[in-house]
Image (cartoon, grey):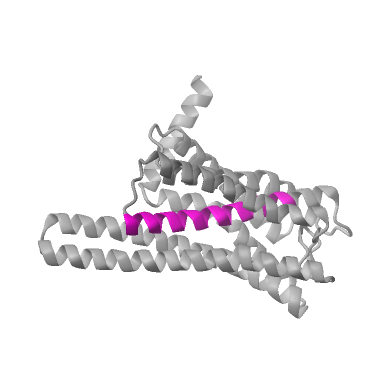
């Protein structure tokens, strides 16, 4: 087993543990806010991607000659949850920014219906883009590394080029733009709100200090989500762009690194939820409850 496969195995194990714990902890909450609902389906998407996408790929031959059915199925279950997670992260970023700016009624049933409809649309969105290669628009083919399959980046027909362009626009450029815009708008609102409250109540007022701390955590959460999104998906998007249109032949280590960065997103997403709370406390509590259910039920 080469170094790349060892790293992918470690990422797969950690991603499975983190997402399973996050999903378990989120689902057992009695009161589920709309943000929690979004995080539940994000963790479910990442767990699906890890178990049905990354895990089977570990057992593929290292130097395949052709794309096997097992390899293509693994590629589909990497692409489908990936596109879904991208849509869900974009929705989370936009909705959190909207709540900060508009102070929408979180408990309103109409809003809950909108969130549930958004979650459904995100899954349909991911399924749509991932199923097109299965119906002939493009294909899931063997990567130059000869160790796994993915969407065909080296395009031969106009249809494949069009699909790749639409994929880069709707599954990278637009989501990144929305995440960036949401983060900047929220950061500006946090600064302006703090200035208004501090000028009216005084910098030394305890309420203003609490407000500053709370809004700073929200700002940090959005910024971290934005940076992680761009960091993990930009290398793979650039590789796809250069491969599809410039016909650039990349070295194996560069392809492996870009793919690894994309895989890390499934492992880090549950940490974005947990960073809002006491991470060590949540993990310890989840382990204790899970152990109780397994060994004492």
Is residue 148 shown above or below 296? Answer: below
Tell me, yes or no, whether the highlighted magenta stretch contains residue 53: no
Residue 120 shown left or right of residue 78 in the figure: left
Q: Residue furthest top?
A: 297
- What's the magenta region? 76-102
| Percent position of residue 133, x then y | 78, 57
In front here: 101 or 47?
A: 101
| Percent position of residue 184, x then y | 39, 69
Q: Main secondary structure of the magenta part?
A: helix
Q: Which residue: 13% across, 55% down?
A: 206
| Percent position of residue 15, x then y | 57, 48
Evaluate whether residue 227 shows in this view: no
Q: Which residue: 68% across, 66% down?
A: 166
In front here: 92 or 49?
A: 92
Q: Which residue: 41% across, 65% down?
A: 183
Is residue 243 shown above or below 74? Answer: below
Q: Residue furthest right?
A: 65
| Percent position of residue 262, x then y | 61, 61
Residue 137 shown left or right of residue 288 in the figure: right
Tell me, yes or no, whether the highlighted magenta stretch contains residue 92: yes
Pick the quarter of the image with the N terminus: bottom right
Residue 273 shown left or right of residue 295 in the figure: left
Evaluate whether residue 286 shows in this view: yes
Q: Which residue: 71% across, 54% down?
A: 130
């Amino acid at each position: 087993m080469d170094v790349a496969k060892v790293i992918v195995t470690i990422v797969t194990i950690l991603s499975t543990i983190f997402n399973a714990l996050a999903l378990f902890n989120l689902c057992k909450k009695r009161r589920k806010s709309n943000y929690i609902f979004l995080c539940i389906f994000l963790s479910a998407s990442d767990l699906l991607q890890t178990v049905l996408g990354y895990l089977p790929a570990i057992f593929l031959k290292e130097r395949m000659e052709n794309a096997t059915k097992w390899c293509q199925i693994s590629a589909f279950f990497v692409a489908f949850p990936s596109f879904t997670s991208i849509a869900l992260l974009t929705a989370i970023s936009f909705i959190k920014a909207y709540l900060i700016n508009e102070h929408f009624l979180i408990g309103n049933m109409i809003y809950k219906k909108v969130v549930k409809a958004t979650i459904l649309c995100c899954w349909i969105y991911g399924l749509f883009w991932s199923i097109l290669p299965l119906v002939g628009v493009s294909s899931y083919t063997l990567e130059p590394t000869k160790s796994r399959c993915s969407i065909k980046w080296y395009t031969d027909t106009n249809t494949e080029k069009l699909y790749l362009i639409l994929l880069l626009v709707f599954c990278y450029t637009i989501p990144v733009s929305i995440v960036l815009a949401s983060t900047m708008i929220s950061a500006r609102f946090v600064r302006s709100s703090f200035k208004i409250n501090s000028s009216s109540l005084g910098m030394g007022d305890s309420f203003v200090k609490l407000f500053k701390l709370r809004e700073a955590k929200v700002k940090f959460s959005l910024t971290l989500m934005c940076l992680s999104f761009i960091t993990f998906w930009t290398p793979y998007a650039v590789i796809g762009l250069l491969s599809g249109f410039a016909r650039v032949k990349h070295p194996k280590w560069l392809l492996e690194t870009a793919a690894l960065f994309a895989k890390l997103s499934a492992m880090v997403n549950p940490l974005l939820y947990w960073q809002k709370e006491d991470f060590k406390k949540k993990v310890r509590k989840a382990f204790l409850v899970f152990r109780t259910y397994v060994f004492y039920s």
